[in-house]
Amino acid sequence: AAFVYNFIKTTQWPQEAMDKDRETFTIGIIGINPFGNAFKPIENQTVKNRTLVVQYFSGFSALPQNSAGLPDLSNYDLASLRRCHVLFICASEADVAGYILEAIANSHVLTVSEISGFADNGGMINFIPQASKGEFEINLITLEKGGLAISSKILRIAKRVISNEKQHRTDDA
């Protein structure tokens, strides 16, 4: 929760995204919540001149499948998902993460997960599974396509940054 909060403080959203809701700043969590009550201390804090709220969404993996074998979104509230400023995609959604990313495309949502390969597959920030506490990688290409900008301080401490030029590693490898 603390890392997500710091990502929020160091990320800039386009005005269009900030106009989604002038009162609240929403962190969405989709899937089986791995955090317990970890977000409680930051809920109702003021961030970017808005009250921070956390909203929980049932995962696409729990939905019935349509005839194409994809999650049936006919009764899913995609509008609320797209209104989030940050969306944490839980590990329970590993098999449908790409479909979730597709459903919120062009919504200026900062996507975060701990699913292996998330940053390589279109996610923006990926906590590295099984790594030391707090290691993450950033897909700067996807972040910029989403209209978002993140502080260079965060880029410097990322374990890996995927950019148009090359992949930057901050380890000694």
Image: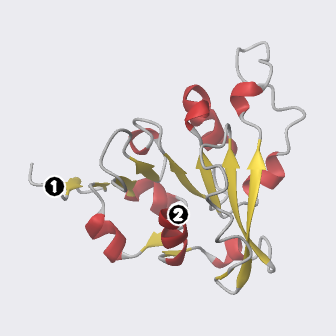
Q: Quarter holding the N terminus?
A: bottom right
The type of colouring in the image is secondary structure
- Which residue is farthest right? 75
Question: Residue 32 lies in what quarter of the image?
Answer: top right
* Percent position of residue 78, x then y: 80, 46
Query: Vertical placement of 72 versus 86: above or below?
Result: above
Residue drawn at x 61%, y 29% is 96
* Residue 102 in the image, given as x and y percentages of width and height: 63, 40
Q: Residue at x 64, y 83 (%)?
A: 48
Name the residue at 21% across, 56% down.
Answer: 168
> CA–CA distance between discs 1 and 2?
22 Å
Seen at 75% across and 26% down, the residue is 62
Q: In terms of secondary structure, where does tag 2 sit?
A: helix
Q: Which residue lies furthest to the bottom in this view?
A: 49
Instruction: Tell me the residue that label 2 is attached to.
Output: 4
Pick the residue in front: 140 or 45.
Answer: 45
Find disc 1 in the rendering and name its residue.
171
Amino acid, disc 1: Asp
Label 1 crowd bin: few (<14), some (14–19), many (20+), radius 10 Å: few
